[in-house]
Image (cartoon, coloured by chain):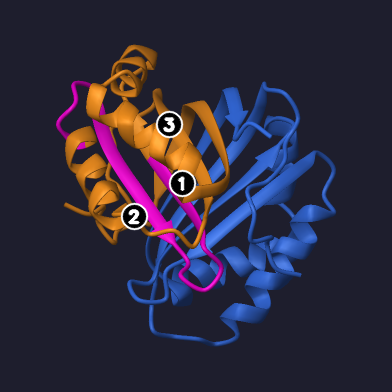
Chain colours: A blue, B orange
Amino acid sequence: MSASAKPARTPEPPYHAVIFTSTRTDADRGYGAVADRMVELASRQPGFLGIESVRDPATGLGITVSYWTGEDAIRAWRQDAEHRVAQEAGKSVWYSDYQMRIAKVERAYGKPA
Amino acid sequence: MSASAKPARTPEPPYHAVIFTSTRTDADRGYGAVADRMVELASRQPGFLGIESVRDPATGLGITVSYWTGEDAIRAWRQDAEHRVAQEAGKSVWYSDYQMRIAKVERAYGKPA
């Protein structure tokens, strides 16, 4: 499962967001399959609200934002065993640089229908 | 000026993030030049901390996250005259769908040096 190519539909705030910005290395080593698997696993976690993910193939820069009911859900997902293996591969093989930010969404609005 | 192809370097939290996720229409109408101009203008605003922006040309989905010292800085930038013209063109011409979320960044960490 990949993230959708549309903005995520989320409930009324407040809720939490994990903003993960990264630059990929040239090393593939199964990246695409693991990335898809992590989206699939995350979306089955308690407290998961949605995910948006984009990478520009030309620059290697990517932004993934996942939405969660709160800090507890984020913590549980971070400690998931299969996710931890992927996190280690991310640090050592797949990402030359990254920033992770945990934020509380206070307000949100979308394009009027 | 375009957003950098690297994760933004921001100060220690707390600070604010504006997460703008959008799907582009097929209409160009000067989009690229205006998008670059908005990054340039935003980065000169009081309270601006950084910006990350990625669009996947294959799907049209884009995520732009800008970082600000607080709500006041976000409000001032939203009300900037040239920005307001661009916002209207975005709603009516450039974006078939979007979600805007204003969030308070509580924790952040990057790849260890």
* Disc 1: which residue: B93
Marked residue chain, label 2: B
Mark 2: which secondary structure?
A: loop
Give the residue type that dot 1 points to: Val
Q: Nearer the viewer, residue B106 or B21?
A: B21
* Disc 3: which residue: B17
* Residue A81 versus residue A13 in the image, above or below: below
Whether the residues at callouts 1 and 2 have beta carbons within 8 Å, the answer is yes
In whole angstroms, how far apart are the C-alphas of marks 1 and 3?
25 Å
Is the residue at mark 1 from the same chain as the one at mark 2? yes
Q: Nearer the viewer, residue B49 or B62?
A: B62
The quarter holding residue A88 reads bottom right
In whole angstroms, how far apart are the C-alphas of marks 1 and 2?
8 Å
Q: Does any portion of residue A100 appear in the rendered image?
A: no
Residue A41 is a magenta residue: no
Percent coordinates x, y for residue A101 in the rendering: 48, 40
Mark 3: which secondary structure?
A: strand
- Residue B23 horizontal side relative to residue A51, left or right: left
Percent coordinates x, y for residue A17 in the rendering: 60, 37
Q: Earlier in the sequence, mark 1 or mark 2?
A: 2
Percent coordinates x, y for residue B8 in the rendering: 30, 47
Give the residue type that dot 3 points to: Ala
For the C terminus of chain B, the image quarter is: bottom left
- Residue A43 horizontal side relative to residue B81, left or right: right
Q: Residue at image x 71%, y 38%?
A: A68
- Residue B3 horizontal side relative to residue A15, left or right: left
Q: Which residues are magenta?
A: B43-65
Q: Nearer the viewer, residue A19 or B56?
A: B56
Residue B29 is marked as: 2
Pair 3/2: label in front: 2
Percent coordinates x, y for residue B40 in the rendering: 17, 42
**Label 1: how many residues lie within 10 Å, few (<14), some (14-19) or many (20+)?**
some
